[in-house]
Amino acid sequence: MQTMITRRTALKGFGTVVALPFLESLATAAPATQSTEIPRRLAFVYVPNGVNMATWRQPFADGKIQELTGILQPLNPFKEYVTILNGLACDKARPNGDGPGDHARAMAAFLTGCQPRKTHGADIKVGISADQFVAQSIGHKTRFPSLELGIERGGSSGSCDSGYSCAYSHNLSWRNESTPNAKEVDPKAVFDRLFAGHDPAELAAARAKRELYNKSVLDFVLEDAKDLSKTLGSGDQRKLDEYLSSVRELEQQIQKAHAATKAAPKPNMPVPPAERDHYWRERYQEHVRLMCDLLAVAFQTDLTRVATFPFANEGSNRPYKMIEVAEGHHDLSHHGNDAKKLDKITKINLFHMEQFAYFLSKLHSIREANGTTLLDNVMIVYGSGNGDGNRHNHDDLPILLVGKGGGTINSGRQITFARRPEIPLTNLYLALFERMGVSAKSFGDSTGVLKI
């Protein structure tokens, strides 16, 4: 029998709802033999253009993870949470008679396990994605059924890869076979969404007032926070103060970035998307980490339990000047085994992994109601629909599963699956569905539940 937890879930004010983390003082007393139910969260983090597989592969045998090397080295502080899954394949990213277009197919098939229809018209078709399959089953339990975050803005029309619609290479999440879920790339828009009230008119007025008078969302819930604090024990008072301080710090970072994109003569005018995009293009690391912070808050406060987050669109050709890589990522991925190009690809891969490690550190710093960390109760799939960007292969993909899934995953291991017969990546999703309490006999091109 599970403990029934009743708690105040949010601070409320004019046009504002600040969701709260678990506060023990507000939990109903329960027998010592019962345990608090902690929700499991599921996220998919995607990196484009494959990786330098030579620096991804680890030198130790299957079993317990030893010291991580190469581009996985930044994950050493969290290696007990990491499961390296070698040998998984995404067959529907292959041509299968459709010719070129591996980048579009790689992202479109990664979470769907379905072959995308080759078209650059309106008749796009692939399949529901794994995140949405879960969200449609459990999304009613949270304010947001799912969150779709991103770094590069995407489109749903036009041709982006050998006759494939841009919808395929720009969208990781699909609500159904013909409807991609647009990702949000503006941290301010995500912040406003997470802390918005329920009344649209009140929300618009509160947002305008915040921007005009440089107010914080916390200013609108100050009285509510004071009233709540009086009912808390000293430990929860400290926890509430720390949480609200972290929200304010995050808000200030976003406000600072937003202010920097505004034209000086028109400080209260909306910032055009192109201006915002240009600002963030030059600040990739800050952009990724703000999105990581926002997702961590959403998981911490149980605003959502499902999320997708591609670090860039598939086929992205952005340069990484901050790490002295001036060439475009996609161009470099066609390295032809050139040592200098491979070295630059490795730099990009390592940089992505450092940002991912930042996200894990954030999750590991957040304590749950039962004394575990948020990282203990998540399941994060990190990887790409391409293996080596030069070969455009879709077998032996670079796939990590990070987190302990509420104690259901024996992590800290490397597992290599047989190449014949191929094990579909979607078999992993069936295993994750089970842990999220979602029933499914099959998904996409699955052949069974992966044993992890």
Image: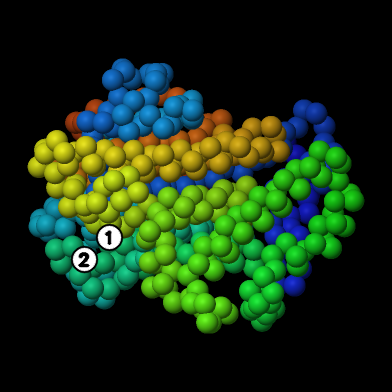
**Residue 364 in picture, x, y percent from top left:** 57, 36
Q: Amino acid at mark 1?
A: Ser
Extreme-right residue of the structure: 230
State the residue position of label 1. 169
Q: Residue 87 or 21: which is nearer the viewer?
A: 21
Tell me if I can see residue 211 in this picture. Answer: yes
The quadrant holding residue 121 is bottom left
Closer to the camera in the image, 208 or 387: 208
**Left or right relative to 21: residue 384:** left
Give the SS element for disc 1.
helix
Q: Residues within 10 Å of mark 2 (few under 14, many from 20)?
A: many
Q: Name the residue: 32% across, 33% down.
A: 71
Q: Quadrant of the C terminus?
A: top left
Q: 137 or 167: which is nearer to us? A: 167
Q: Position of residue 425 (x, y in %)?
A: 31, 42
- Where residue 313 appears, as percent x and y from the top left, is 31, 57
Q: Specify whether residue 377 is in view.
A: no
The vertical placement of 145 against 429, above or below, is below
- Circle 2 residue: 160
State the colouring used for the structure image: rainbow
